[in-house]
Image (spheres, helix red, strand yellow):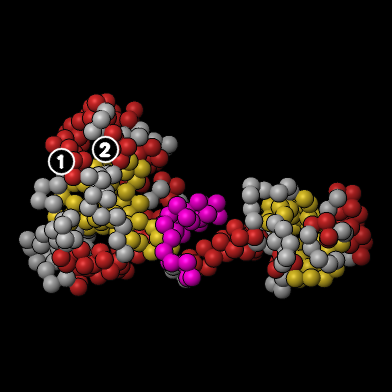
């Protein structure tokens, strides 16, 4: 950049109450003109600017293409407080020439939040996000029919973290797709292992969740089916769960993609059914094999006649469409008896078990869980289809 260009950028920065910055993304070094202290930066001139940028924002900046740059970043210099800034300028190769402007304080971001973001990003790179497995039980015979794969983060130093502890962070960072891919992949690997390691081939399946946003994302089906093929999951033994309310955002597109998923040999589960009750009349356009009745209705049925009426309607509809029915949130023997009387085929909930780690799930496949449910039935044929 010419001396004249330097001067013009510095003057523009002073007029806007901003900093002028020339950043080399390859080295992380920057030339800064202006009152750097006002932005929490300890010095002016040449410095390791990228070290002061939140780790997840560094990836955003590095992924910025050629041409105009307009990004909101968080600065977190060592020993300083978190500040939001706007980087406005141009990128040419690895060089960014821009103004750095104040952009407010942001929603409760702290240094510990940035540490958690960095840890989650590193955790995804290290494949620390895995599946744990909640049993799904056949109500007639009370034996293990399958599992739902649920996200867990095995965070070093802190142990196993549940979804409420990190999915909000993944969503904010735009990492939900990566989390989903790792959970679905972990579930596929464990399912295949249970088939090859069992003395008798068990009649079980695993289901895992995918959001409609993930379904609509480019390359989802290829990535998903590739994971199943790589793990050698038998056809028909993996299910994909989709939430009812999400599907109705764009039903035509959803129907097209779901038919493609179904054609790949994956069965489809409509999750949390009942939360979008107005869509009952449109359900037949989607190729679902299973309906899961939302736990709100299951838990309300004991004392609420309207909840029982809704559940009876769902069961009747599912029967007419040739679907099987799973009741979620079954927490007591009384609830299990009630959903069985209503015509549900399967149940899932703490009455049987919470989410089991892969080793505990493997043992459940082999021997059931004493006092809760029997092991799965064996496939009648030697092959698995």
Residue 158 located within the stretch drawn in magenta: yes
Q: Which residues are magenta?
A: 154-180
Quick check: can you spot residue 82? yes
- Residue at 54%, 65% (x, y): give it: 119
Q: Where, quadrant-wise, is the N terminus in this rendering?
A: bottom right
Q: Quadrant of residue 371?
A: bottom left
Label 2 sits on residue: 298
Question: Tag on residue 337?
Answer: 1
Q: Where, quadrant-wise, is the C terminus in this rendering?
A: bottom left
Q: CA distance from mark 1 to mark 2?
A: 11 Å
Q: Nearer the viewer, residue 289 or 42?
A: 42
Q: Nearer the viewer, residue 71 or 160?
A: 160
Question: Tag on residue 229?
Answer: none
Q: Residues within 10 Å of mark 1 (few under 14, many from 20)?
A: few
Contact, CB < 8 Å: mark 1 with mark 2?
Answer: no
- Asked which secondary structure carries label 1, the reply is helix
């Amino acid at each position: 950049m010419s001396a004249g260009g330097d001067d013009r950028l510095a003057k523009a920065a002073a007029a806007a109450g901003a900093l002028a910055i020339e950043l080399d993304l390859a080295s992380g070094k920057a030339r800064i003109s202006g009152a750097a202290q006002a932005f929490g930066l300890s010095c002016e001139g040449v410095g390791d600017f990228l070290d002061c940028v939140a780790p997840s924002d560094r990836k955003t900046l590095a992924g910025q293409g050629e041409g105009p740059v307009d990004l909101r970043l968080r600065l977190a210099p060592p020993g300083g407080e978190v500040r939001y800034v706007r980087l406005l300028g141009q990128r040419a190769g690895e060089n960014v020439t821009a103004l750095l402007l104040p952009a407010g304080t942001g929603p409760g971001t702290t240094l510990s939040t940035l540490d958690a973001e960095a840890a989650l990003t590193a955790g995804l790179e290290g494949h620390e996000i895995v599946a744990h497995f909640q049993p799904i039980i056949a109500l007639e015979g009370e034996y293990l029919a399958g599992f739902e794969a649920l996200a867990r983060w095995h965070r070093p130093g802190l142990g196993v973290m549940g979804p409420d502890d990190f999915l909000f962070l993944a969503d904010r960072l735009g990492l939900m797709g990566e989390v989903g891919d790792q959970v679905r992949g972990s579930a596929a690997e464990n399912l295949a292992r249970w088939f090859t390691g069992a003395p008798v081939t068990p009649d079980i399946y695993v289901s895992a969740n995918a959001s409609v946003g993930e379904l609509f994302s480019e390359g989802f089906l290829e990535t998903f089916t590739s994971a199943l093929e790589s793990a050698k999951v038998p056809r028909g033994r993996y299910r994909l769960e989709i939430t009812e309310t999400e599907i109705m955002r764009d039903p035509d597109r959803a129907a097209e993609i779901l038919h493609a998923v179904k054609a790949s040999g994956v069965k489809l589960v409509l999750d949390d059914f009942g939360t979008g009750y107005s869509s009952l009349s449109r359900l037949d356009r989607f190729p679902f094999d299973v309906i899961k009745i939302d736990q709100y209705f299951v838990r309300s049925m004991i004392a609420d006649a309207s909840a029982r009426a809704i559940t009876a309607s769902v069961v009747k509809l599912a029967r007419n469409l040739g679907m099987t029915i799973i009741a979620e949130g079954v927490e007591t023997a009384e609830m299990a008896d009630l959903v069985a009387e209503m015509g549900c085929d399967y149940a899932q909930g703490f009455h049987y078990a919470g989410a089991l780690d892969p080793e505990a799930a493997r043992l459940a496949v082999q021997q059931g869980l004493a006092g809760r449910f029997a092991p799965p039935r064996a496939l009648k044929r030697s092959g698995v289809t």
